[in-house]
Image (cartoon, rainbow, N blue to C red):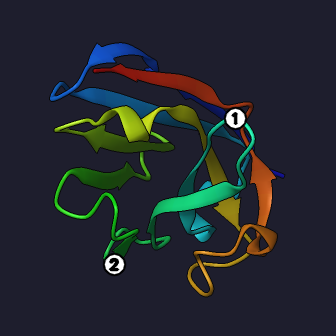
Amino acid sequence: QVQLVESGGGLVQAGGSLRLSCAASGGTFGRHAIGWFRQAPGKERDFVAAITSSGGTTDYADSVKGRFTISRDNAKNTVTLQMNSLKPEDTAVYYCAAHRSGWGFVRTTTEYDYWGQGTQVTVSS
């Protein structure tokens, strides 16, 4: 079992930055790839970024590549999503999730077993 709690969301102007954190509890955090997803009102939950269990490989949606950076600290059971050059279209609830393995089909929500409650990110124009 892995419990996940996101933090760091808020309101920011376009062009600004936010740093989201995902804190995990439970004994198996280091075995799971971790993904970030986002969901805007009336839309599906979309993949944003993912990182392998070891932190050695990352994947990003094209819409955030070059602006967002995912990282993890297995000693502290945390995953961070640094978001720069934010745009109004980045507005959404952001969720972190633990994948069922160390890596795999990381862009698919059904491959994730554990989810946080989400944190709101709002980017004003």
- The secondary element bearing badge 2 is classed as loop
- Tag 2: amino acid: Thr
Image quarter in which the C terminus is found: top left
- Looking at the picture, tell me which residue is in the foreground, 79 or 109: 109
Q: Which of the 4 image quadrants contains residue 106?
A: bottom right
Give the residue at mark 2. 57
Q: Which of the 4 image quadrants contains residue 118?
A: top right
**Residue in the picture at 60% in, 59% down:** 46
In percent of width and height, residue 22 lies at: 53, 37
**Residue in the picture at 16% in, 38% down:** 85
Give the residue at mark 1. 41
| Badge 2: residue crowd in 10 Å (few <14, some 14–19, many ≥20) | few
In percent of width and height, residue 67 lies at: 20, 51
**Residue in the picture at 40% in, 68% down:** 61
Determine whether 1 is above or below 103 in the image.
Answer: above
Name of the residue lying farthest toward the bottom: 104
